């Protein structure tokens, strides 16, 4: 039974923020995952392009999201992801949400990001069902 249908696990839909952080202007993947999340029954907020890490943190905290998905294709993941994590930690919100990264992240950078607290990294070509299943299985329980 999925998290969305198990009444013992969840009383509200999974709330997600899909964010384009930094100067990356390629947002097709962010739009695709946003629609897939919506179609899966998640509540979805999309940040729009060119968001500063601080803006993403504010949106995640204000929207009380269960999952924050960062879409990064610019190669700036080693700078932007730590800035988002630090911001979430400053609000004591980091441990309350799932943090996933989508986009192009070289293999040599993945372990470092996971050690920092990224829950999963999904590269180009990842089937949507895999991402959705991961989120359903790992999103925090909320009333």
Image (tube, rainbow, N blue to C red):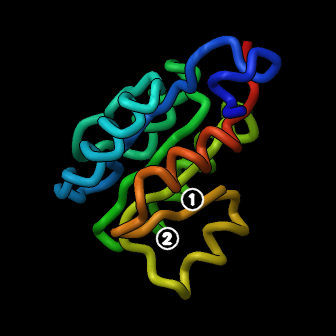
Q: Is residue 31 left or right of residue 3?
A: left
* Percent coordinates x, y for residue 36 in the rendering: 36, 39
In 3D space, how far apart are the residues under numbered discs 1 and 2 (Cα atoms)?
7 Å
Using the image, determine if residue 96 lies above or below residue 115. above
Taking the image as shown, residue 127 lies to the left or right of residue 136, namely left
In the rendered image, the residue lying farthest to the right is 8
For the N terminus, which image quadrant? Answer: top right
Position of residue 29 measured from the top left corner of the image (x, y, whole percent): 27, 54
- Pointer 2: what residue? 78
Place of residue 114 in the rendered image (x, y in percent of width and height, measured from the top left): 67, 67
Q: Circle 2: is it few (<14), some (14-19), or many (20+) Cα within 10 Å? A: few
Q: Residue at x 65, y 75 (%)?
A: 112
Horizontal and vertical percent position of residue 35: 30, 36
State the residue in front, 140 or 77: 140
Q: Quadrant of residue 9?
A: top right
| In the depicted structure, whether residue 130 falls above or below residue 91 | below
Residue at 27 percent of width and 46 percent of height: 32
Count of labels shown?
Answer: 2
- Is 8 in front, or is 135? 8
Mark 1 and mark 2 residues within 8 Å of each other at the beta carbon = yes
Using residue 23 as the reference point, say whether residue 52 is left or right of it.
right
In the picture as drawn, the residue positioned furthest to the front comes out as: 1
Determine which quarter of the picture holds residue 110.
bottom right
- Residue highlighted by disc 1: 82
**In this view of the protein, which residue sits in the foreground, 26 or 38?**
38
Mark 1 crowd level (few <14, some 14–19, many ≥20, 10 Å Cα): some
25 to the left or right of 119: left
Image quadrant holding the C terminus, namely top right
């Amino acid at each position: 039974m999925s998290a969305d249908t198990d009444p013992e696990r969840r009383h509200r839909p999974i709330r997600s923020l899909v964010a384009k952080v930094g100067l990356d202007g390629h947002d097709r993947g962010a739009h695709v995952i946003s629609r897939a999340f919506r179609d899966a029954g998640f509540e979805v907020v999309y940040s729009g392009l060119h968001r500063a890490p601080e803006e993403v943190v504010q949106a995640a905290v204000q929207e009380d999201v269960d999952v924050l998905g960062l879409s990064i294709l610019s190669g700036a993941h080693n700078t932007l992801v730590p800035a988002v994590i630090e911001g979430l930690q400053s609000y004591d919100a980091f441990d309350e949400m799932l943090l996933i990264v989508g986009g192009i992240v070289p293999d040599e950078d993945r372990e470092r990001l996971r050690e920092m607290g990224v829950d999963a990294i999904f590269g180009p070509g990842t089937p949507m069902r895999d991402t959705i299943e991961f989120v359903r299985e790992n999103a925090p329980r909320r009333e």
